[in-house]
Image: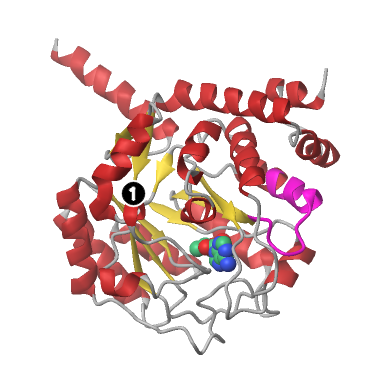
């Protein structure tokens, strides 16, 4: 049996075999087979739903200096901003009106947002919109900080591991950052009961199938509820300005592979994928993705959250154009869902509880 079928039958492979799988997956037939299996699994756990999340990029101030990122602290040209709590709440109000039931608060590692301030923001959102989930994506913090934020009502946390290879991590980050700490944060978040999202860029400088094989092994070990992947896109004011962008095609293959590896995972068709290919989103759904995150940030700030060149923030990327997005999603035969959209395990539990309640009422 070839490596593709072996992986489909039992996705627990050795590192060398994952490399072999990645190599073999480049063939058109193999790509098709992986996508078909990925879509089958996605349908099994989530039906035809594509979940929408409202993304609020609330600060582009960052104390880190990641070599790939346009909002790294050494980029003096970045026009910095920070939303007030009122501005954030007003984004939620707009989003709630548009039907969103998950708000993703994403930002650079901005020290102004202390635990007190962050908890206050989370508490206000949960207080005003108790039927909505709050997802945080605000980088590495202490266990105590994650604990307090969880207590304040945040239930999900996105923290891409960026690469699971120690050596590769060092090439992408300044020396004060470490993969060990990044991983520690992810494990702590899990321990605290967050639904956790990891992930990486596809085609980041220095990445080969060897690094990607390590990413797959790490995802298998961590068992995150969400995985965010998108192609690396160079930013003109970073040290990686002249590096080639990652490939859409490889990103799609990886979406399928990750869906097969973690069948219940929530897998966004990311902005970077949409930026690199006008049909990137649809291709992402056809490869196994089932989440989209339109932008709810105030219009005046959107362009400033420039992680990479030409980052989309208008059209279907904008939450106000939800109708366009819905049309596109439905044209591809999926259904855009505005529900909270928890990971399948949780959804199953809730479905069971609901049917039990109904039985009790009979
Ligand atoms: N290209 C693509 N993705 C990027 N990110 C940061 N910079 C870039 C870039 N140049 C991703 C990182 C980060 C997420 C918020 O955006 O993976 O975790």
Q: Residue at x 53, y 84 (%)?
A: 73
Image quadrant, ligand 1: bottom right
Percent position (x, y) of residue 85?
23, 73
Q: Residue furthest top?
A: 362
Instruction: List the residue tagged with mark 1.
Output: 53
> Is 211 included in the stretch rendered in magenta?
yes
Q: Residue at x 34, y 50 (%)?
A: 316
Whether residue 1 can be seen here: yes
First to last magenta residue range: 202-216
Q: Quadrant of residue 358?
A: top left
Q: Nearer the viewer, residue 262 or 50?
A: 50
Q: Is residue 34 left or right of residue 319?
A: right
Q: Residue at x 69, y 73 (%)?
A: 242
Q: Is residue 319 left or right of residue 79?
A: left
Q: Residue at x 77, y 63 (%)?
A: 206
Quadrant in the picture for the N terminus: top right
Percent position (x, y) of residue 313?
37, 61
Q: Residue furthest bottom?
A: 76
Q: Is mark 1 within 8 Å of ligand 1?
A: no
Question: Callout 1: helix, strand or loop?
Answer: loop
Answer above or below: position of 299 versus 252: below
Whether residue 101 can be seen here: no
Q: Is residue 215 left or right of residue 80?
A: right
Percent position (x, y) of residue 17?
83, 35
Answer above or below: position of 85 versus 29: below
User: For the residue carrying disc 1, how many other residues have a C-alpha within 10 Å: few (<14), some (14-19), or many (20+)?
Assistant: many
How many discs appear? 1
Answer above or below: position of 40 versus 234: above
């Amino acid at each position: 049996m070839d490596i593709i079928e072996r992986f489909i039958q039992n996705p627990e492979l050795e590192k060398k075999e994952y490399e072999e799988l990645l190599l073999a997956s480049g063939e058109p037939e193999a790509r098709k087979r992986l996508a078909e299996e990925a879509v089958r699994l996605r349908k099994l756990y989530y039906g035809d739903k594509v979940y929408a999340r409202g993304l609020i990029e609330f600060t582009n101030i960052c104390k880190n200096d990641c070599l790939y990122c346009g909002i790294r602290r050494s980029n003096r040209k970045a026009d910095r901003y920070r939303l007030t709590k009122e501005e954030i709440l007003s984004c939620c109000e707009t989003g709630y009106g548009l039907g969103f039931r998950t708000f993703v608060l994403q930002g650079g590692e901005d020290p102004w947002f202390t635990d007190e301030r962050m908890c206050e923001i989370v508490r206000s959102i949960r207080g005003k919109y108790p039927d909505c989930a709050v997802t945080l994506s605000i980088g590495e913090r202490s266990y105590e900080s994650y604990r307090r934020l969880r207590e304040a009502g945040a239930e999900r946390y996105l923290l891409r591991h960026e690469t699971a290879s120690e050596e590769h991590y060092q090439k992408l980050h300044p020396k004060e950052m470490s993969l060990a700490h990044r991983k520690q944060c992810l494990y702590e978040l899990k321990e605290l009961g967050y639904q956790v999202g990891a992930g990486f860029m596809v085609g980041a400088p220095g990445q080969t199938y060897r690094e990607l094989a390590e990413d797959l092994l790490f995802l298998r070990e961590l068992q995150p509820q969400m995985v965010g992947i998108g192609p690396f896109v160079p930013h003109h004011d970073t040290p990686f300005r002249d590096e080639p962008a990652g490939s859409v095609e490889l990103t799609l293959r990886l979406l399928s592979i990750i869906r097969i590896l973690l069948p219940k995972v929530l897998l966004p068709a990311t902005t970077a994928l949409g930026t690199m290919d006008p049909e990137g989103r649809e291709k992402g759904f056809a490869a196994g993705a089932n989440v989209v995150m339109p932008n709810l940030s105030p219009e005046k700030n959107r362009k400033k959250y420039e992680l990479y060149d030409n980052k989309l923030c208008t059209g279907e990327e904008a939450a106000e154009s939800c109708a366009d997005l819905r049309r596109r999603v439905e044209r591809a035969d999926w259904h855009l869902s505005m529900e909270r959209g928890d990971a399948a395990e949780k959804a199953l539990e809730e479905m069971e509880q609901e049917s039990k309640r109904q039985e009790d009422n009979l």
